[in-house]
Image (tube, rainbow, N blue to C red):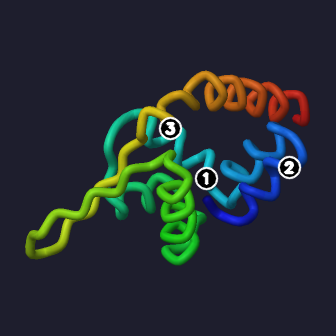
Amino acid sequence: MRLPVSRAMEVCPVEVAVSVLGGTWKLTLVKHLLDGTRRFNELGRLVPLANTKTLTRQLRELEEDGIVLRTAYPEVPPRVEYALTERGQSLAPLVSAMDEWGAEFARQQK
C-alpha cells in the first residue's frame, strides 16, 4: 500500500478515497475505463490535456491501489492494455454521481 493511503487510513475513510482517487486525471481515467479496456494511447487521446508522464504515473498508482489492471502483451510493437479490476468497477456509482454533480455545478456557473 502506498504511504499516502496508509496515512489516510488513520484519519477518515473519506481521506482514504481522496488519497486513492485524488490524483490528477485519476477519476477521468476511471470514467473512461468504465466503458471497457483501453490502450495507453487511446487513454491519452481521451484525456488530451494530460501529458504522457502524468498519465503513466496516475495509471501506475491506480494499479498499485488495485483499481486498474495493466496487461502487457509480448508483441512487436509492444501492446499494453488497461482495464478496471472488480474494485475499480465498484467505483461506477461514485463516478456517475460525481459526473452528474460536476455537470450541474458547471451549468450553474454560467
User: Which numbered marker is on residue 26?
Assistant: 1
Closer to the camera: disc 1 or disc 3? 3
Q: Residue at x 76, y 33 (%)?
A: 102
- What is the secondary structure assignment of the residue under circle 1? helix
Question: From the image, which quarter does the N terminus lie in?
Answer: bottom right
Badge 2: few (under 14), some or many (20 or more) residues near its Cα, within 10 Å? few
| Corner quadrant of residue 41 | bottom left
Q: Nearer the viewer, residue 104 or 95?
A: 95
Q: Amino acid at mark 1?
A: Lys
Q: Residue at x 9, y 75 (%)?
A: 76
Question: From the image, which quarter does the C terminus lie in?
Answer: top right
**Which residue has dot 2 on it?**
10
**Which residue has dot 3 on it?**
88
- What is the secondary structure assignment of the residue under circle 3? helix
- What is the secondary structure assignment of the residue under circle 2? loop
| Corner quadrant of residue 84 | top left
